[in-house]
Every structure is written in C-alpha cells, then in structure tokens.
Amino acid sequence: MRVAIADDEIDVTQFLAKIVEEQGHVAVTFSDGSLLTQALVRDTFDLVILDWMMPGKDGLETLKWMSETLTDAPPVIMMTNRTAKQDITDALNAGADDYITKPEDRGVIAARINAILRRTTSTGAFETKASYGKYELDRIEQTVTMDGKTVSLTAKEFELADLFFRNRDRTLSRNYIMETIWRTTASLATRTLDMHISRVRSKLTLKPENGFRIFTVFGYGYRLETIDKG
C-alpha cells in the first residue's frame, strides 16, 4: 500500500514514515498541503495522513479540496495537536475517516493505519484465492486460470495481474504500479512497465468479450475496467 504523509514538522513525517514502512507499506512525505494536493492530482495513494496546521493549504482546506476535486479520493487520517471536540467534528464532517490527537503511541498509530487500509481494500484482496469472472487467481501458487485453463505468467506478470484485479475500476498511476511491483520508481524504464502490461493484457486476453480490459489513462497510468456485457 502507498501512504501519503503531510506535516510541516520533519521529525513527525520521519516518525510516521517509519511506522508506515514497518507495516510493509510505502511512505511518501510532504511538507505542506499544497504539495500534497499537487501530488494527488498526478499520483495514486491508498491512505493520507494529514496534519491540520500546515503552510499552503491547511488540513481542513485539503480535506475539502479532496472531496470536491478527486473522483476516487483515498481515506484520510487527520493527525493533529488540536483536541477540541468541535475540531474533531469539523474534520470528520469534512471527510476525514479517523482522527488522532498528537502525541500518540506508535502501536496505536500502526493499528489505526492498518484498520483503515483493511476497511478500504477491495474484497478478496487478502484471500489466497479469488475469482473475477472467467479468471481465478491463486496467490500462493501465483497462478491464473481462465475458463479453467492455466495461463503461464512470470512472477512480475502475476503481481501486475493481481494488482489490477484487486484494484479493478480504479485508476492507478505509473508511480503507484512501479513502487508496488518493483519497489522503486527511479531505475525502471517506462518501456519496461509498458511491456509487462502489454504481456498481461495479451496473455490473459483482457478484452471486453472476456469481461475486462486494461485502459490507458494518458499522462497518468492504467485502469482495469470491468465490462458489463449486459
């Protein structure tokens, strides 16, 4: 999972990033709300941890911007020094999914992060086997069958297919895909990503007649669309 952390205190972002990474997720940090909103336009995140008092856009302004601007906004944990009940009410009404008052124990923060991610992850994401129309994925054996026939995929191709099916009908940025599958964005050539996606599309015959297609969102990334043949 990919988690955005916005706070103008470096020690806080480092503290939160370490907790996020200890849970096996990728942390991306921002020093103000404006930088975060710029990133949300061009990139994909599974969760946002948001401070209230920040330069640029403050936390409440960022929350309102997300609800008004993003068609598929990630869940938000507001983490702030503000403790008044009205502040908590305002943040939750503006779209926050949870509210943590600083300072808080690292174990509690980790539990809150994982609880939000469990609630918002697609159904079946953590099951060892999952079916999507004609396709069945075995995450232990890393195999895909289509109409009962096994399709030969490399390890990376399977991970890509699994990522797309778990996030079907959700647009994923190129950075999100590269960090999730290759654990990096720096050294992976664009051609490598495009080649792997082309192979997955071809090997699994992801066409409308089979219920799914991989759609390219130019300048952003890709989306596995569910096709309603009815």
Image: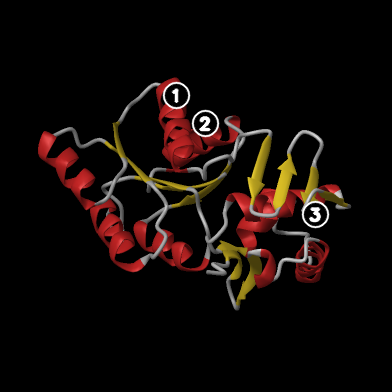
Q: Is residue 195 left or right of residue 49?
A: right
Dot label at residue 222: none
Mark 1 Cα-neighbour bin, 10 Å: few <14, some 14–19, many ≥20: few
Q: Is residue 79 left or right of residue 192?
A: left
Splitting the image into 4 quarters, where does residue 106 fall?
top left
Residue under label 2: 19
Which quarter of the image is occupied by the N terminus? top right
Q: Secondary structure at mark 2?
A: helix
Residue under label 3: 157
Q: Which of marks 1 and 2 precedes in the sequence?
A: 2
Residue under label 1: 106
Q: Which of marks 3 and 1 precedes in the sequence?
A: 1
Asked if residue 140 is positioned above or below residue 56 in the image, the reply reads: above
Q: Secondary structure at mark 1?
A: helix
Q: Residue furthest bottom?
A: 218
Q: Is residue 189 left or right of residue 8?
A: right
Residue type beneath disc 2: Ile
Residue at left offset 86%, top offset 52%:
153
Residue type beneath disc 3: Glu
- Nearer to the camera, 14 or 152: 152
Residue at left offset 45%, top offset 68%:
41
Residue at left offset 66%, top offset 68%:
214
Marks 2 and 1 in Cβ contact (< 8 Å): yes
